[in-house]
Image (tube, rainbow, N blue to C red):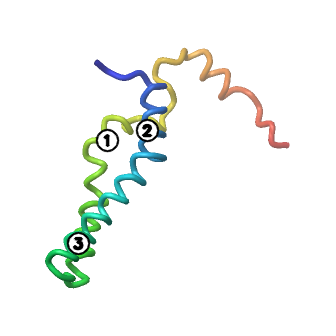
């Protein structure tokens, strides 16, 4: 079942505002737990772990974010053409 464009936009906003901060909290908590259990690791190892974790959250969320910044593909061509033809209102 494919999500609609509007649903993907809303879900991506939810992921960025709620899911990503929760993921950051969990990642830092796990690193702190490992430090307490096995002792402090060298800084370069922690940097590598944080970089990997920083990119890891994007893997399952990629289908949600794909194409969200583009115009709605289901919108009619007339609406997008008239929006482009209007003069700029910024004076």
Query: Which residue is under mark 2?
Result: 12
**Inter-mark Cα distance, 1 to 3:** 21 Å
- Quarter of the figure with the N terminus: top left
Q: Which residue is mark 1?
A: 61
Label 2 sits on a secondary structure element that is helix
Residue bearing mark 3: 48
Image marks 2 and 1: residues in contact by CB distance under 8 Å:
yes
What secondary structure is found at the residue carrying circle 3?
A: helix
Taking 85 as reference, is 30 left or right? left
Q: Earlier in the sequence, mark 2 or mark 1?
A: 2
- The quadrant holding residue 49 is bottom left
Q: Are marks 3 and 2 in contact (CB under 8 Å)?
A: no
The dot on residue 25 is: none
Residue at the location (14% across, 77% down)? 38
Task: Tell me if residue 39 comes above or below residue 21 in the rendering.
Answer: below
Residues at marks 3 and 2, CA–CA distance in whole angstroms: 26 Å
Q: Foreground: 38 or 48? A: 38
User: What SS does tag 1 mark?
Assistant: helix
In the depicted view, which residue is nearer to us: 50 or 34? 34
Q: Residues within 10 Å of mark 1 (few under 14, many from 20)?
A: few
């Amino acid at each position: 079942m494919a999500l609609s464009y509007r649903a993907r936009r809303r879900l991506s906003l939810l992921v960025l505002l709620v899911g990503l901060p929760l993921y950051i909290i969990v990642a830092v908590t796990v690193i702190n737990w490992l430090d307490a259990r096995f002792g402090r690791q060298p800084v370069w190892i922690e940097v590598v772990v944080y970089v990997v974790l920083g990119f890891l959250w994007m893997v399952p969320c990629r289908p949600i974010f794909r194409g969200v910044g583009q115009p709605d593909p289901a919108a009619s061509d007339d609406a997008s053409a008239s929006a482009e033809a209007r003069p700029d209102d910024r004076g």
